């Protein structure tokens, strides 16, 4: 017995560790064991959450399938939506580019605006015509010549479709050759249209222009319409001040969107 005890003491002494060191190692082992236990517990909790989430996903898939929605079709729908969104962004950028091109007309005092979801060049009626008349004034021809120059010299604008829209104020028109405001607005729109699509005058060097030429734009891209007093930009159809009436007497060149360009142009105001 004494011999065995002596051997044990020799063995412990031979390890070279003090009681404090052994206690410290034991504490480290206990901490590692506790950390491992905590990690195992967290792993079990995460696995349970994963299993629950997977179960919910499978349940949703089942509901979609029961509702007739296939996951592949859903992916296809998302892809198509993304493609359409990109197309709309490209269209919007195209209109931004068109507006930048048309903004050159502001240099001659014209307004380019977005109205009723259409891009519009507004031409003051008093600049184009005398009161109650549909014959272009000299200043009107000068303005339209500059408009035609901007549109005709730009390959993109020259290929677009435009409508010339005539508008009047709300003062009744009667007794004249146009019968009413409808007739006056239509006739003025037609006059502007004819000037824009009339071929440019070909003059010889040194010869004076006769003034019979026009804007030289492609007639296939242009049409005309009259709105009378029904579409005011100031006041209402029933009530207009003198300033309102001045603004409402106008001719508009309306850029017509293509079918794929039917989007909200208010985004580019």
Image (cartoon, helix red, strand yellow):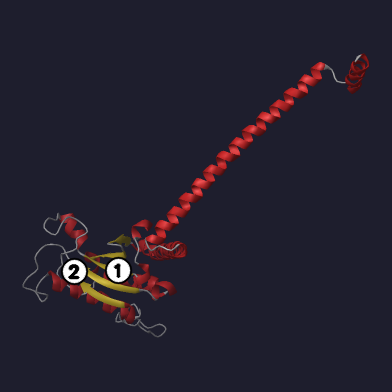
Question: Closer to the camera, 54 or 111?
Answer: 54
- Residue 134 visible here: no
Does the CB distance between marks 2 and 1 fall below 8 Å?
no
Task: Tell me where residue 209 sits by quadrant.
Answer: bottom left
> Which residue in the rendered view is the most extreme toward the front?
1
> Which residue in the rendered view is the most extreme toward the top?
2
Helix, strand, or loop for circle 2?
Answer: loop
Q: Quadrant of the N terminus?
A: top right
Sooner in the amino-acid sequence: mark 2 or mark 1: 2
Task: Tell me where residue 36 sits by quadrant.
Answer: top right
Task: Tell me where residue 80 sits by quadrant.
Answer: bottom left
- Residue 169 visible here: yes
> Which residue in the rendered view is the most extreme toward the right?
3
In the picture provided, is 111 more to the left or to the right than 57?
A: left
Graded by Cα atoms within 10 Å as few (under 14), some (14 to 19) or many (20 or more), the crowding at tag 1 reads many
* Label 2, label 1: how far apart the Cα atoms are: 13 Å
In the picture, the disc for residue 227 is 2
Q: Residue at horizontal 37%, vertical 56%?
A: 267
Q: Residue at horizontal 54%, vertical 43%?
A: 48
Q: Position of residue 154 (x, y in %)?
A: 43, 72
In the picture, the disc for residue 254 is 1
Q: Quadrant of the C terminus?
A: bottom left
In the picture provided, is 183 more to the left or to the right than 142?
A: left
Helix, strand, or loop for circle 1?
Answer: strand
């Amino acid at each position: 017995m004494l011999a065995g005890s002596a051997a044990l003491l020799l063995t412990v002494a031979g390890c070279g560790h003090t009681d404090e060191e052994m206690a410290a190692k034991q504490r480290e082992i206990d901490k590692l064991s506790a950390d491992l236990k905590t990690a195992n517990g967290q792993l079990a909790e995460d696995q349970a959450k994963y299993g629950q989430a997977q179960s919910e996903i499978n349940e949703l898939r089942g509901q979609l399938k029961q509702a007739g929605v296939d996951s592949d079709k859903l992916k296809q729908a998302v892809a198509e939506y993304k493609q359409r969104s990109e197309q709309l962004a490209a269209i919007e950028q195209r209109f931004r580019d068109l507006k930048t091109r048309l903004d050159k007309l502001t240099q001659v005092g014209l307004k380019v605006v977005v109205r009723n979801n259409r891009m519009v060049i507004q031409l003051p009626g008093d600049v184009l015509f005398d009161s109650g008349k549909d014959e272009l004034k000299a200043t009107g021809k000068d303005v339209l010549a500059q408009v035609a120059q901007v549109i005709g010299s730009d390959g993109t604008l020259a290929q677009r479709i435009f409508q010339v829209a005539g508008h009047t104020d709300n003062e009744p028109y009667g007794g004249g050759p146009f019968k009413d405001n409808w007739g006056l607005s239509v006739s003025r729109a037609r006059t502007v249209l004819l000037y824009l699509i009339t071929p440019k005058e070909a003059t010889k060097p040194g010869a004076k222009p006769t003034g019979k030429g026009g804007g030289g734009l492609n007639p296939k891209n242009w049409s005309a319409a009259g709105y009378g007093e029904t579409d005011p930009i100031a006041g209402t159809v029933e009530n207009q001040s003198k300033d309102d009436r001045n603004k409402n007497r106008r001719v508009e060149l309306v850029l017509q969107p293509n079918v794929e360009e039917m989007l909200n142009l208010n985004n580019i105001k």
